[in-house]
Image (cartoon, grey):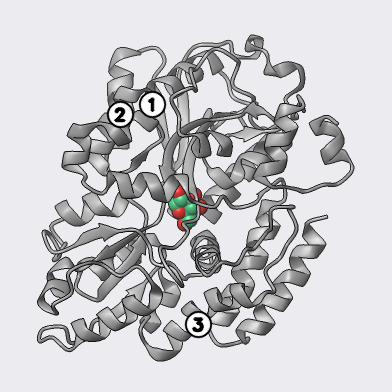
Amino acid sequence: MGGRQFTRIGVVLLTVGMLAACGNSGGGGGGGSKSSSDAFTGRGPITLATGKDTSGNLQNQVNAWNKAHPSEKARIIELPEDADSQRQQMVQNAQTKSDAYTVLNLDVINTAEFAGNQWVLPIPKGKIDTSGFLPPALATATYFGKEYAVPWKTDGALLYYRSDLLKKAGISSPPKTWSEMQSDCTKVLKQPGTKGMSCYAGQFDKYEGLTCNFSEAVNSAGGEVINAQGKPDVDTPAAKKGLDFLVNGFKSGSIPKAAITYQEEPSRRAFQTNKLVFMRNWPYADALMKKEAASKVKGKFDVAPIPGLDGPGVSTLGGHNLAISAFAKNKASALDFVKYLTTQDAERKNLLATSEAPTIASLYDDQALVKKFPYLPILKQSVTKAKPRPQAVQYGDVTAAIEENAYDALQGKKTSDQALKDLQAKLQTLIK
Ligand code: GLC
């Protein structure tokens, strides 16, 4: 059965396993005849629509391209910082068939929606060598066996911890479980100079980051949001243990109240101004906390795998891929630009400048890089073992249901039991 038939009969969600199966059986996505390289003509100025660049390096990369390609200059169109607003603006742009955005920096969760609606074109075969990309990252750019984007940055969760304070408290290695994290924190907070600090925070505002943190908690307790058969399965004792880790954290004060408004950047700012002992965040935070003038934790923190219920946790797979709008002009220039940003050399330089996680697998084993970023093997594990979020054309509805119920539970508006029950019921209406 081809991809078109799949979508026509109303299957809105594909697990990664199903996607792989469709790919093997030659399922074709929605690209149609435009998937040939014929559609990739036109040279001239282009734009890159992307979420706010917290890394500070993107303009440098674009400047270097522009210097070498004076008649095909790229301009950054900066969208908001949070994933939901970025998606909204990109969707609006696509729905009006606007040519304003040429290259889209698409969050990994948006491939299915943009490919399924034919808002982005499949990358023509043979134009970009994809053999060196981390397989999980490449899978996020693939829809019904076709690559609709090129992996650019991947993301796996990391546990940032105050190595200085753990050491002072006599703790020699970072915690592997949630209960170890709690007992380590209790010891640390007994030390002088820790007044006003809380144990832990992640990203708990009502947005995509909450979907990541909630799913991570569920998966790290042995639960699942969507099971291997592609069915919602979140109303389980294991999922409850995961959600309770967060709910109880808020109740007990281990997680500060303010964290209910945290997205990535506010949580990073809290950690770097001595408000947290432990923080869950993506790799980008490392470089900024090492170099920003406002950071008070330079040389005082380290990175470990995220903890879970009985041992190391399971990250949610994050990341961004570069796709080319179906409505854009100058697609030949766009393709070259995408290629330029995703070479091994470009990704290497970007890692050095920003600590953002590359998608080229070999960079994780590059000894010079491992020396500079000793946590690269931890990051590789985090990414390769990470659990992808559902690949759904209607992902926006799926994530809204997760955000709503998880947020209500964290705020104490619903019990964990009720939130999971309601979420399960809602997901069952969305995922047929
Ligand atoms: C990061 C991840 C992305 C995720 C977002 C949530 O940007 O790369 O996949 O959706 O965080 O806030």
Q: Can residue 117 be seen in this view?
A: no
Residue 108 horizontal/vertical position (percent) = 54, 43
Query: Where does label 1 land, which residue?
Result: 341
Q: Determine whether, in the image, residue 233 is placed left or right of residue 212.
A: right
Which mark's residue is nearer the viewer, 1 or 2?
Answer: 1
Q: Are the residues at dot 1 and dot 2 in contact (C-beta closer than 8 Å)?
A: yes
Residue 132 horizontal/vertical position (percent) = 43, 25
Q: Is mark 3 on a helix, strand or loop?
A: helix
Q: Residue at x 76, y 68 (%)?
A: 426
**Corner quadrant of residue 358:** top left
Q: What element carries label 1?
A: helix
Residue lying farthest to the front in this orientation: 310
Query: Where does label 3 land, which residue?
Result: 247
Which three-letter amino acid code belongs to the residue tagged 3? Val
Which three-letter amino acid code belongs to the residue tagged 1? Leu
Q: Is mark 2 on a helix, strand or loop?
A: helix
